[in-house]
Amino acid sequence: MPPPVEISIPTTSLSSTSDSKPYTLYNITLRLPLSSFVVQKRYSDFAALHTTLTSLAGSPPPAPLPAKSWLRSTVSSPELTEQRRAGLERYLRAVAESPDRSWRDTPAWRAFLNLPASTAGSAASASGVRPAALGGLRDANAAAAADPGTWLDLHREMKRALHDARLYLARRDAAAEGGAGRSSAAAAEAGAAAKRELVKAGSLLAALAEGLKTLGEVGRLGEGELRRRRDLIASSRVERDGLDKLSASLAIGGGGGGAGRSGTPSTSADKAALVGSGPRAGGRVLGGGALPETRETRELDNDGVLQLQQQRMRDQDEDLNMLERILLRQREMGLQIKDEVDAQTQMLTRIDEDVDRVGSKTKVAKDRLKRLN
C-alpha cells in the first residue's frame, strides 16, 4: 500500500512562457513520510483528470471540480484565483482522504501527482529522487517555499540530497581504489549519481532563497527566524560547494605504476594522451562542437548538463547582484564623503573670511596706537 499523501495548494504562479497567453499554475505540494515535492498544474489539467477519473471509476469524485469561468480570468482576478485555488485543494483532498480508493488507485491519479506506480517506485520515493524536483521546477519550488511549513520540507529535501551526494562520493572513491574494470564502472556510476544530487540540491537552494525573500517581504516570519533560516542556507551553500569541488576532482585509481597510485599529479600531456586532443568520434559535443567535454559534464546526461548550466548562470546572476549592491554602497559612501568635504570647505572659507576680518581690525587698531603715541 502506498504511503499516505498530504496534499495542499498553498500558492499559485503565472506561466513564464512567451509563446502563449499567460495562465495560472497551481503549485500542488505533496508531503510523504520521507520526502516532499511540488507539482505544477493548470486548470485544464484538473478538468482532464476529473473526466478521466469519472470514466475509470464509474462515478465522479466525492468533491465537485470548481466551475470554469467564462467572463473572468484568473490572470486578472486575484479573487477568482483564490476561490479556484481553495476549490481545487478541496477537490484533491477529497480524493486523497476518501475511504473509497477507486479514484486514487487509477493510473491517471498517480500520473497527475507524479506518484510511484509500484513498490520499486515507492523505494525511489523514499530515497528522495523526485521527477518534479529533478525536472527543474525551480519556479514551483520557489513559490511553494513561500509557505513557512513547506520551506522546512524543501530544506529537509535539500539536506537529504547533500547527504546522498556525500554517500555517492564515498562510494565512488571506494570503487576507484579497485582499479579498472567493474570497479571503474561503479565509480563512474556513483560519480554521476552524486552530480545529479548536487544539481538537485543547488536548484532547491535557489528556490529556498527566493522563498525566504518572499517570506521576509510579506512579514510571515520574525526577524530572528529569518536570520536563522538565512544561516541555514549559507551553511548549506558552503557544504554544497565543497561537495561540488570534491565531485569535480579526479578519483584516485589506475593500474600498475600510474600517477594516481604513486601520488604524482598527472601532467597536461598525460591527460591529453589519455582523453585525446578533441571530442571522440561518436561522443557527445557541446555547443555545436565549440565547447569541449569537461570533468563536470562527462558524468551528466543532457538534462543534467542543462540544469548545471542554469545553476551556474543563476550563481553568476547572484554574484552580479551582490557586486551591484556593493557598487551602490560605494557610490553612496562617495556621495556622503563629497557632501562632508563640501561642508568642510565652506567652514574653512568662513574661517578664512573671519581671519581676514580680524586682520583688518587688528591693522586699524595698530594704526590708532601709532597715532596715540
Image: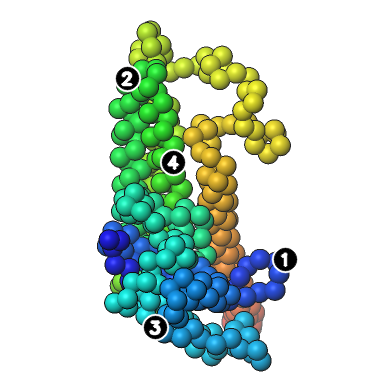
Side (left or right) of 107 relative to 279: left
Quadrant in which residue 302 is drawn? top right
Note whether residue 238 is visible.
no
Query: What residue is pinned by disc 2?
Result: 178
Residue type at the position of mark 4: Lys
Q: Earlier in the sequence, mark 4 or mark 1?
A: 1
Q: Tell me the residue at 47%/65% (across/down).
A: 108
The residue mark sitting in front, 3 or 4, is 3
For marks 3 and 4 on the same chain, the one whose residue lies earlier in the sequence = 3
Q: CA distance from mark 3 to mark 4?
A: 43 Å
Q: Nearer the viewer, mark 3 or mark 1?
A: 3
Q: Amino acid at mark 2?
A: Gly
Compute the Cα span from label 3 to label 1: 37 Å
Q: Which residue is mark 4?
A: 195
* Residue 297 sits above or below residue 254 on the image: below
Q: Position of residue 248 (x, y in %)?
A: 45, 34
| Sequence-first disc among 3 and 2 | 3
Q: For the C terminus, which image quadrant?
A: bottom right
How far is the residue under mark 2 from the one under mark 4? 21 Å
Q: How is the image coloured?
A: rainbow
The answer to whether mark 1 and mark 2 are in CB contact below 8 A is no
Among the two numbered marks 3 and 1 on one chain, the one whose residue lies closer to the N terminus: 1
Q: Residues within 10 Å of mark 2 (few under 14, many from 20)?
A: some
- Residue, disc 3: 62
Dot 1 alpha-carbon crowd within 10 angstroms: few under 14, some 14 to 19, many 20 or more: few
C-alpha distance separating marks 3 and 2:
58 Å
